Image (cartoon, helix red, strand yellow):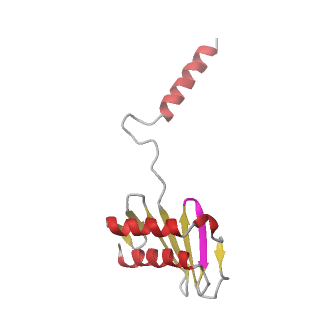
């Protein structure tokens, strides 16, 4: 006797959890996430760049030019994130900690740390993007 109501309930639950017609199943994750925390006043800056170049940050929202997005992609690829250490340097009193997350790997760089050139190039570009709005 309970089979019909349970089967009907299962169908209703399955239909409710399915995306509506024409609705995207899932939004792609960000291309890169940049964070800057710390400093004398304890800032908490962040920036997310989507694969299409849309930027959402604590400094405003904007879109990267195609050239800037291509440069960012190239520097991220060239940094070889899987081969990077997860943390560079040690925390400094009132210093900043910079974070870059790419393809699921987060790398933190403490102020005055000796990071590889390929990572410093990424940090330089994301700082420029964050500070200049594209």
Res 1 → quadrant? top right
- Asked whether residue 83 appears in the rendered view, the answer is yes
Q: Is residue 106 magenta?
A: yes
Q: Is residue 67 above or below residue 7?
A: below
Residue 131 is situated, as x and y percent measured from the top left of the image, at 40, 79
Kindly report the secondary structure that dominates the magenta region of the rendered protein. strand
In this rendering, the count of numbered labels is: 0
In the image, which residues are magenta? 103-109
The residue that appears at 42% across and 58% down in the rendered structure is: 51
In the shown orientation, is residue 49 left or right of residue 93?
Answer: left
Residue 47 appears in the picture as rendered = no
Q: Residue furthest top?
A: 1
Residue 88 percent coordinates (x, y): 64, 78
Q: Residue furthest front?
A: 78
Residue at position x 46%, y 51% from top? 28
Where is residue 72 shown, x and y percent of the image? 43, 68
**Which quadrant of the figure has residue 50?**
bottom left
Q: Is residue 61 above or below residue 11?
A: below
Picture residue at 51% right of the left edge, 65% below the top = 77
**The C terminus lies in quadrant:** bottom left
Q: Tell me what residue is drawn at x 45 percent, y 49 percent.
A: 27
Quadrant of res 53: bottom left
Expressed as whole percent of the image width and height from the top left, the position of residue 120 reads 53, 79
- Is 85 colored magenta in this rendering? no
């Amino acid at each position: 006797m309970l089979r019909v109501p349970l089967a009907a309930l299962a169908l209703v639950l399955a239909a409710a959890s399915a995306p509506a017609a024409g609705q995207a199943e899932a939004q792609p994750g960000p291309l890169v996430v940049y964070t800057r925390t710390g400093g004398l006043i304890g800032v908490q800056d962040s920036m997310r760049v989507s694969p299409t170049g849309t930027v959402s940050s604590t400094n405003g929202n904007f879109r990267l030019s195609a050239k800037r997005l291509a440069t960012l992609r190239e520097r991220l690829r060239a940094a070889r994130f899987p081969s990077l250490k997860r943390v560079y340097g040690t925390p400094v009193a009132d210093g900043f900690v910079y974070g870059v997350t790419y393809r699921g790997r987060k790398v933190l760089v403490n102020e005055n740390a000796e990071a590889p050139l390929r990572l410093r190039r990424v940090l330089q570009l994301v700082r420029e993007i964050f500070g200049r709005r594209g």
